[in-house]
Amino acid sequence: MTRFPHDRFDDVTDGPRVGAHRGMHRRGRGWIAFAWAALATGVLVGIGVLVLALLNGSYSFSGSDASSSPSASSSASASASPSDSSSPSTPAAATPADQGSTTLVVLNGTSTAGLAAKGTSTLTTAGWKVTSSGNAGTTGTASTIVYYQQESQKALAEGIAKSLGTTAVEQSAAFPNADVSVVLGADYTG
């Protein structure tokens, strides 16, 4: 312990003070500052990760049902129940002339190579404009389903499904990169 020169404040008897202003340090004072710094770092890192995920498109807050979440999109094509297109209030299926600027994507939901190309060929032969094609996120899709984003695109989805020889259409936000997405399943032969 360091010895300080004796001064007039050392004679004060009102506490454990030694010298002019040399009091005892509280124990654990350094841990409190460390805890606050760690908490601030954690909060800033969490906010940064959330902002990057939103900018990257990993999260979507557009829908309120479970089928619009990114984790549900991989299982939506495998376990989705197709809606019945023969209800009396729905309009007739649209034709390729009605497509306009609606984007159409064809995805292979199976492990069969070249199925998306066959589906694209079938649709372009029927007059539809396919924006792109490729593989879906899963390979275990059993049945072909045509997904559409907005209710106004249902007739187009039904027309596309008719051109593919299926009737399964479903409204879903699981495929945000296209207005209408076709997920070809194991039942599609091309």
Image (tube, rainbow, N blue to C red):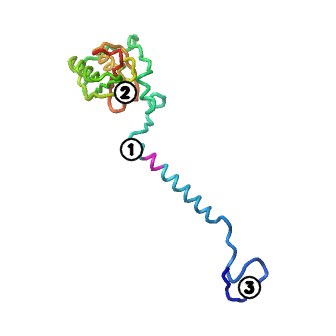
* Sooner in the amino-acid sequence: mark 3 or mark 1: 3
Within the image, what quadrant is residue 37 found in? bottom right
**What is the three-letter code of the residue carrying label 2?**
Gln
Mark nearest the camera among 1 and 2 is 1
Would you say residue 56 is visible in this rendering? yes
Secondary structure of the residue carrying numbered label 2: loop
Residues rendered magenta in the picture: 47-51
Q: Is residue 38 left or right of residue 180?
A: right
* Closer mark to the observer between disc 3 and disc 1: 3
Compared to residue 39, the image places residue 61 above or below, namely above
List the residue tagged with mark 2: 149
* Image mark for residue 10: 3
Q: For mark 1, what is the residue? A: 55
Determine the residue positioned at 77% across, 77% down. 15
Residue at (45, 50) in percent of width and height: 48
Residue 162 or residue 117, whichever sits in front: 117
Give the amino acid type for the residue marked by disc 3 in the picture.
Asp
Q: Quadrant of the C terminus?
A: top left
